[in-house]
Image: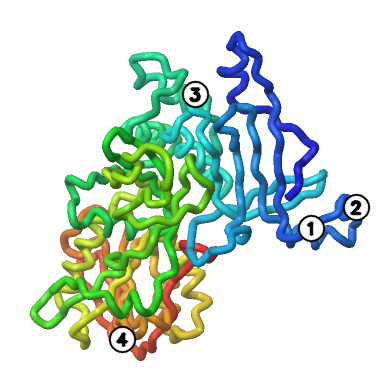
Amino acid sequence: MRKDSIKLTFISYYTYYSSKLVRYKRHCVRLSFFAAETDEDDFTDPAKKEKIERLYRGFLILRPTEPQIIGRSLISPKALKHRDFLACSTTVSTTVNSIKVCVEGFPHSSQDAETIKCAETTIWALMEYYGSKYPEYKPVLPSTIIKQLNSLSYERQIPSNGLNIMQMSFALKEFGFAPRIYAKEVYKDEFDKLLRIYIESGIPIVLGLEGGSIGHAVLCVGRNTITDKQIEALSESIKVSEDLSIYCWESLSPSCILIDDNHPVYQQASLNKPTSYYTEGHPDWKKCEIAHFLVPLYPKIYLEAFRAKQYVIQFLASSLLPIDNSELLVRLYLTSSRSFKNHVALSAELQDNVRNMILETSMPKFIWVAELSTKHDIKSKKANGLLIIDATEANLNYNYPLLFAMYKHHVLTPDFESNTLEKKVVALSPFLIYEQNLKPA
């Protein structure tokens, strides 16, 4: 760990703290973390630059806002003792003693409890992630979040009283997303499963927690690694036809990885006890449940998870794709067609003719993919078939969303002019599933 001599301006200072009578300091201190000890001379030795880059594990900023002093930070999961999980991550460039370094992880900060509370901090972290990862978005300051919500506010915004789920959704909409809110009271038994589908899609999700007098917002950015034992124990299935039942990957229940501004980064908790790591403080923390979750979708994703799952079940029940197995395991996720085609192009298990058919299929920017496997094959990270579904098509009639389907020896491709499905017989071996949405810690 190293305390950097460079001081950083506190981003909320000029919009709030400078207007107070009591004088608040306007500088912060940045701590840099390394996996092993580094010497002062290492930073001026060209031969040691590779060592510095290899050992660097991130940074944390200390603010003069006691007791909530943790400011902007990005810590690599590699800095943790226990990191058996998969999570969303982005790469951020910074400097230590004027040496350029990079760190991969998820942005984090504590709330200062005056200018920003949990909701604003959650939006900030989300925009910091997307802004550093995709050109369509940019990071925002807390003051920008406050200004963006001005048209919705009927009273003063500073000091902050926090935001509800609707205000958070409005802010994300103004920042370029097409948010979708899911309520537990509406989706009931499907609520947690839909949340897990989006987790598998590698999308950071805002969780709205409620319990007793507590209302809180956190980000869910990943999940624990799923074990063979958990897969084998999966018992919940959906009977889609007389001869076919399917196990859904989202029925598995690994712990989730949370970004909580009240705790250090990468907390782990189950969806039914999302605040189990709160061992101190108000007793109502133990009562918290996920009441809503908010998904920041790309604006042209019109087919959301609930209807995408409906379509997959409907299609498998139609028998259009001959299934010679009485039980399937279906893994559904959203991804970019660019990333998925890259995976297909590099998949050595796929036969050349099948690979070329997928690569030559026209696809929108985002697609839903349903991988068809079995409990046995998924343990080896293998699938026997897949459905590729158009994420821009919300009309589920006449198989409009279907772009490509295959299972073992059968391939279906749509002919949009005649509104029919062309059938082909091919030789297809099990192939590796797609795992680029979440990165191992």
Rendered image coloring scheme: rainbow
- According to the picture, the residue beneath numbered tag 4 turns out to be 408
Marks 4 and 1 sit apart, C-alpha to C-alpha, by: 53 Å
* Residue 338 visible, this angle: no
Q: Which mark is residue 37?
A: 1
Q: Going from the N terminus, do you reach mark 4 or mark 1 first?
A: 1
| Mark 4 surroundings: few (<14), some (14-19) or many (≥20) residues within 10 A | many
Q: Residue at x 30, y 77 (%)?
A: 372
Front residue of 60/95: it is: 60
Q: Closest to the observer: 327 or 352?
A: 327
Of callouts 3 and 4, which one flags the residue occurring earlier in the amino acid sequence?
3
Q: CA distance from mark 2 to mark 3?
A: 41 Å
* Mark 3 neighbour class, 10 Å CA radius: few under 14, some 14 to 19, many 20 or more: some
Decide which of 121, 347 is in the foreground and name it.
Answer: 121
Is there a contact, CB below 8 Å, between mark 4 and mark 1? no
Q: Against 137, is 418 above or below?
A: below
